[in-house]
Each structure stands twice: as C-alpha cells, then as structure tokens.
Image (tube, helix red, strand yellow):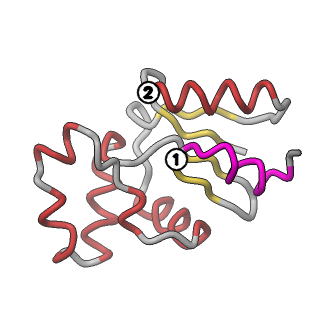
C-alpha cells in the first residue's frame, strides 16, 4: 500500500501516525517531490468512486491563486487530470492506495471501514 502525502501537512502526519499505530505497512511517497502522472490520477479517480473535484486541494494556496473554484466547473475531465498531474500541491492529501481502494483525505472512520479495523 502507498501513502501519498506532503510531509509538512498535519493531516498527512496524523494519517501516517494512525497507520503506524494500527500496524499497517505502507510505502510513503512525497507528492511535492513526485507528482502523480495523468494515468495515475485517472486510475485513482476510477478506483475511488469519488467525483474528480474531491481530488483537488481546495484549501491550498495554488488552488486559490489559479482561481480553480470558478474554473473547474467548466473544465473537461482531461483538463482536470492534466492540472492535477502538473503540481502535487493541487492534489488533496493524504491519498492511501491499496489493491482495490483509494482513500482521499484522512477520515479515521472511513479508513477503519475500508481497512477492516475495529
């Protein structure tokens, strides 16, 4: 399993600690140093079952600078995929990826359910 995160992000730090406490093995990937490829973003989107807009870091500076709140509704999926792949800081994190799931953002209840933890 892979935890895609940004080390300075407090939510990512919380998710990482939670995984460690629950003895869940994972590989860590810094999204700022290792942007996702368009094909990865498409795969995550498909596996997650979430709307594509859930993959955007809406509280990030870059999102706000680019005025994406107003632009996203008129953009095609392909344009949105390209944008997400262009800069890891546009992507909501953490993203936790397993063989048959993709979790976006850290919600302990959701993560427990997907990972089958009491």
Main secondary structure type of the part rendered in magenta = helix
Q: CA distance from mark 1 to mark 2?
A: 11 Å
Say which residue label 2 marks. 9
Q: Which percent across, then down, holds residue 113?
A: 77, 55
Q: Is residue 47 left or right of residue 5?
A: right
Is 110 colored magenta in this rendering?
Answer: yes
Say which residue label 1 marks. 105
State which quarter of the image contains the N terminus: top right
Q: Which percent across, then down, holds residue 21?
A: 79, 25
Q: Nearer the viewer, residue 108 or 104?
A: 108
In this picture, is 25 found above or below 2?
above
Q: Is residue 79 left or right of residue 9?
A: left
Q: What's drawn in magenta, residue-wise? A: 106-116
Q: Is residue 88 left or right of residue 99?
A: left
In this picture, is 7 found above or below 86?
above
Give the SS element for disc 2: loop
């Amino acid at each position: 399993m892979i935890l895609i995160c940004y080390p300075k992000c407090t939510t990512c730090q919380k998710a990482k600690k939670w995984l460690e406490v629950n003895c869940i093995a994972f590989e860590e990937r810094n999204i700022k140093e290792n942007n996702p490829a368009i094909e990865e973003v498409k795969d995550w989107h498909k596996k997650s079952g979430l709307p594509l807009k859930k993959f955007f870091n809406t509280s990030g500076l870059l999102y706000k600078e680019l005025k994406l709140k107003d632009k996203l509704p008129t953009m095609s999926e392909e344009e949105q995929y390209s944008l997400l792949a262009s800069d890891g800081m546009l992507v909501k994190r953490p993203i936790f990826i397993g063989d048959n799931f993709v979790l976006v953002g850290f919600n302990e209840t959701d993560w427990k359910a997907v990972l089958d933890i009491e």
